[in-house]
Image (cartoon, rainbow, N blue to C red):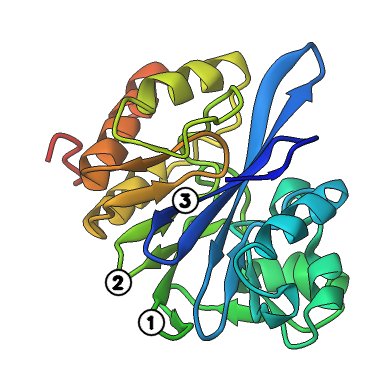
Amino acid sequence: MITNSSSGTNLHEIAPAIYRINTPVRIPGGSDFNFNQYLVADDEPLLFHTGPKQMFPLVAEAIGRVLPLKRLRHVAFSHFEADECGALNDFLAAAPAAGPVCSQVAAMVSVSDIATRPPRALADGEVLRTGRHAFKWLDAPHVPHGWDCGFMMELETRTLLCGDLFTQGGSGAEAITQGDILGPSEAFRQQMDYYAHAPQTAATLARLAREQPQVLACMHGSAWRGDGASLLRALSRSLASQANIPAAEGIDLAA
């Protein structure tokens, strides 16, 4: 569903009551790119990523196609960065009962100071229930970047809100795919490597794989449906081989 004909912002359900909001953009140099946010329609609606501040009207308009904006209760994000939470305070102003949700590190170093309401700082492994859905917070420092980085695993639909992992260029026209996203995402990374390549990267990806996700909700590009554990392990192998970084000790990347 196109929610704004001028921008091309569109809305699609990628898992039960989980909606991808996608806006295609042109970036310097004339290339196509895209930003995704994920709306969870539940007793306590949750938005994962806000988009940049200037995109607030487009995202708010798309949310309004599913539920009244003022019903939002949780505004969550992977790490502190403009496209993750640039419009955070705009959403808090529009939804009086909403509060930020982030990692404990993000709350400590940024969000407690910047946000107009105190954040709910989730501990590693802590579960946030929104009604029918339950979100397990997974700390992922420096994967792919940001000390404060983390992801949310939705336990009922096995949907991993995986932030900047598997970033794909282009407009993101296909809402969800079962095709190859590792190849396009690795090709994009090679143009501008945004990974921190931290010592624990392989261990973090192995831990995410153990969650057995069935849907990967990417922040840039198509969402993906399939054997998420295998895809995460394949990403780990690709990072280790191309960056010449040895796999973390004791982790079998072929498992």
Q: Are marks 1 and 2 in contact (CB under 8 Å)?
A: yes
- Which of the pair 247/95 is nearer the observer? 95
Question: Residue 161: x, y in percent?
Answer: 46, 56
Report the disc number at residue 132. 1
Quarter of the figure that contains the C terminus: top left
Q: CA distance from mark 1 to mark 2?
A: 8 Å
Q: Amino acid at mark 1?
A: Arg
Q: Residues within 10 Å of mark 1 (few under 14, many from 20)?
A: few
Which is closer to the viewer, label 3 or label 1?
1
Q: How far across and down, in percent of the image, does residue 215 sit?
A: 33, 50
Query: Which image quarter: residue 238?
Result: top left
The alpha-carbon separation of the residues under discs 3 and 1 comes to: 20 Å
- Left or right: residue 2 versus residue 155 is right
Q: How many marks?
A: 3
Which is nearer the N-term, disc 3 or disc 1?
1
Q: Disc 3 and disc 2: Cα gap in Å?
A: 16 Å
Report the side of 193 relative to 16 (left or right).
right
Q: Please give the label number shown on residue 162.
A: 3
Residue indicated by mark 2: 156
Amino acid type shown at disc 2:
Glu
